[in-house]
Image (cartoon, rainbow, N blue to C red):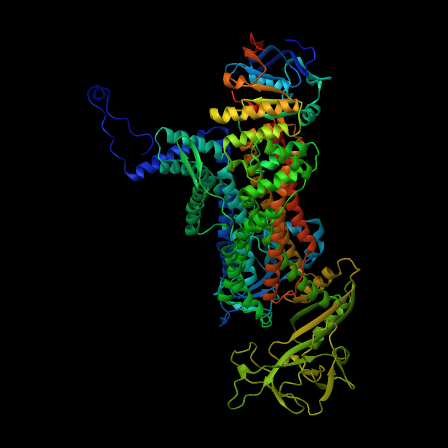
Amino acid sequence: MTLLRSRPGTDGERDTAPPALPAARRAPAVWARDLAMGMRFAAGGGREGWIRTALTAAGVALGVAVLLLGASAPTLMNAWHAREKARENLGQAHPPPPGDRTLLYASANTTFHGTAIRGRLVRPDGTRPPVPPGLDHLPGPGRMVVSPALKELLDSPGAGLLRERLGAYRIAGVIGDEGLQGPRELTYLAQSTTLGERDGYRIDHFGKNWEPRPLTAPATVLVIMTCVALLTPVMVFIGTSVRFGNERRERRLAALRLVGADVRTTRRIASGEALFGSLLGLLGGGLLFLAARQLAPAITLWDINVYSADVAPGPVTALLIAVLVPAAAVLVTLVAQRGVTVEPLGVVRHRPPVRRRLWWRLALPVLSALLLVPLVLRHRQPWDDTPVNTFRLAAGSTLLLFGITALLPWLVERVVGRLRGGPVPWQLAVRRLQLNSGPATRAVSGITVAVAGAIAIHMLMTGMQTGYAAAYAKSGQVPRISFWGHTDTWRSTERALAALRATPGVTAAHGTIDLNAGRMPAPGRDLSRDLPAVLTVGSCAELRHLARLPACKDGDVFVTDARPDRDTGITPGATLNLNPPLVYGEPAGRPRPWTVPPAARAARLLPSGDGHPRYYDLLLTPAALDPARYTAPDMQLDVDFDRGTPDAVEHIRNTAARIGPTMYESSSVDNPHDRQLDGVRTALFTGAVITLLLIGAGLIISTVEQLHERRRLLSVLDAHGTRRATLGWSVLWQTALPVALGLALAVTCGLTLGTLLLTIIGTGLAVDWAGIAGITAIGAAVILFVTALSLPPLWRMMRPDGLRTE
Amino acid sequence: MTPAGSLLEARALRKAYGPTPALDGADFSIHPGEVVAVMGPSGSGKSTLLHCLAGIIRPDSGTVRYGPHTLTDLSDTHRSALRRTDFGFVFQFGQLVPELTCLENVALPLRLNGTRRKAAEHRARDWLERLEVDDVAAKRPGEISGGQGQRVAVARALAPQPRVVFADEPTGALDSLNGERVMGLLSDAARATGAAVVLVTHEPRVAAYADREVVVRDGVAREMAGAA
């Protein structure tokens, strides 16, 4: 039987014969009508109905927005990589010959106050060179085009040294969006008239066949855990909000039963009510997503900054979200009605209290352990970033987080069940939880998952950051900045050293010319698979910084003890090939023989200042070998500086740019990981706060709803003279107990998961107790917040109005 | 009505809910150990009178005196304290705290007064025995019958040894047999302890347990002719 059958017959028929039973409507039509009626109730169901609809819509909107943002991550990364792929070509496998459509292209990256700036230099060979995306034509000689963010930086008052560094080029225009990875990217493209063949690569097009590296396992786990930690509270919030005003809804459904609606009809009507809120939420979520992605240009996470347009989920994923989230809200509504039968004269609850069992609740954590523990046990081997391992890591972490939601109700029941005695507020709270801890635990499970996830991610971040910091601290003990660049002669290297020594803040500068040498071809020898020996050319003074030399004059050669375990073939009198393959595995060019002087003497290498071993096999003075004989000699310049001199590093970089704009910098001056990880940590903390506030809102709804259902009892207690403080404390304990247990479980699981993850990826354990305390403190603040906001309705309900029966 | 020697006395009580007057100059008094039935049709103001007498609500005008205290002048805190120490309550329904056991429910007013748990529960158990429901002491209200629940509620009202018990339709949700049993136990126990009982009811059979009857009609209380 269903409600609202079509009106039988006409007036005339009514007079003559009993009305015929109406023809049964087809199921889809009946369903549609019942759902529509539920939606109408939701829209016009009074204050409680509207609150429920608004809360459901808010929860669904947040869920949809978070899911859409999460689903945008892969496409966002693809778009980010695709932009890089379209504009880049640092070397072709088969360099084209110079022509009208070719140009020389080189990297001229630099760093300014710890921020990386991507620089590219071009020198067209002809009149029709290729043009990268974002530009109509290449800038003219001595001109450069810059990204809007770089232009802004160059125009800022604190960028004088950067203006000086790039002063060789005048700004001729701004790079369009197509030529940038993100709106805040700092990049420039300049035409250099001095760019040499050996400084860069000859190319005939931009864009290359380069596939982005997939996310590493820790990054994948990070993304998945973030989504789980964010979505679980949202789902909990939806679950809480659809239960709001349940009592009145049940009364209304009973009234519908009284006028003829059957049980299934009432369920469909209830679903329709939830569906209305869900559809509103879907719309709101879409709008929220569109609004949130407008913020994308302002956010830089792990040095990734993207355009709003690039934040877009795939169509299939978006469709799935649009269907599944509202369906989930309806499902939650139906699940909430389990064990409740709406009868014409009221609601019958026939679910006997069931003792919670542990065994099945352990299934998820056990499954998680089965996935993760084998990875931990093999941690002495280096982490193998295979798809299977990544899946195991991600699935294990997710299962453990979800497992918490199953374990928490059991834990609360067991712990609360053992509590006895105490003052009246404590007793009221404990007894209430003993009678039914479901609603409180349900809301708290969101906090638990969010906090556990946040702690694990926090640990992962801290572990990685500590590792980086230790490495940087070790290598950065001596304030040093190093550069590599092409050179032809020792004299040019000496000039570079002199320029650097004259730079403000420089305390010392040392340099050599490094080159590789291979063995001469021989029958049966694959030169492409030979590991080359490393030769370094420098004055006796420079070589003495590298090794203990017996005596030295220009023209001397020294064989070192760099790699006693490897047969490099370097012995006095041996003939070496000065034209080995530049890249391991590539075919060798025409051999260029050079004989190690028979008078070469032995020398013992000194350890480097930063603790790294040196790998120079042969030390040569300039007269012993002219670097020009080598294909691509590099000068290496190590510059020590005084940290106390303002902007010493920027002055040194300016000098290096004058020596050669394509000089490559290697330094431990700025630890980029600190900035990257700090950004993630800030995002994590913000996310945790928002999540916990969301849970707080859910808890308030749940608490106020319970108070509302107990308003008559509250009036009776008030009549007995119960103090407001007594019931206020009772509400506090009732909120605090499950939250405290949830936080304890969250900290335990978060630390366990964090430890497992760090062990698996082979990073040292590091726990940021202050961070954990901070997140836990927010959880505690949520308890106080919920209690404080519950007090006004509590006191409002402690009025005698509830005693009136007439 | 003769206020001389009265324990609780109300004069010229007026109380309106919005434009509707519930009490319109009602007078009332009760002596120690006396059982007074307040009768009247639905909406006559019986419950409002009880709530004013018990200090649950403050009348718009008029005074309620309890011994040396003028209830209408006392703060909410003091009235609450008085209700905890000197008054007991029995309502029609929704009065037992569902999550507490029956024993804990009876002990609750004592504990609210600061009595230690063991002592409170000891006395509560005595009262459950007197009301013949000691067998449900460990059960929760949801697990017992309506009649047992009302007897537990009477035990709770009497356990702190109040000087006045306010009973608002205490048998309204019970069948006649259970109703009479509850009333018998309530009136006997009250007389045994010397507590006065203000009994709001619209059932003459329940009012028969009273020493005196007062009828409330149109917000005015009148002594029943011929009442003791």
Of the pair A404 and A521, the residue shown nearer to us: A404
> Which residue shows up at 51% across the image and 46% down it?
A235
Q: Can you give x and y, in whole percent of width and height, for residue A609 in the image?
A: 75, 72
Q: Can you give x and y, in whole percent of width and height, for residue A662 in the image?
A: 63, 66
Q: Can you give x and y, in whole percent of width and height, for residue A54 in the image?
A: 50, 35
Residue A527 image-quadrant placement: bottom right
Q: Can you give x and y, in whole percent of width and height, for residue A505 in the image?
A: 78, 63
Of the pair A688 and B138, the residue shown nearer to us: B138
Q: Is residue A504 above or below residue B43?
A: below
Q: Is residue A251 above or below residue A506?
A: above
Residue B47 image-quadrant placement: top right
Of the pair A80 and B105, the residue shown nearer to us: B105
Q: Is residue A257 left or right of residue A757?
A: left
Q: Is residue A305 above or below residue A216?
A: above
> Which residue shows up at 51% across the image and 56% down it?
A359
> Is residue A176 visible in the rendered structure shown here?
no
> Is residue A255 visible in the rendered structure shown here?
yes
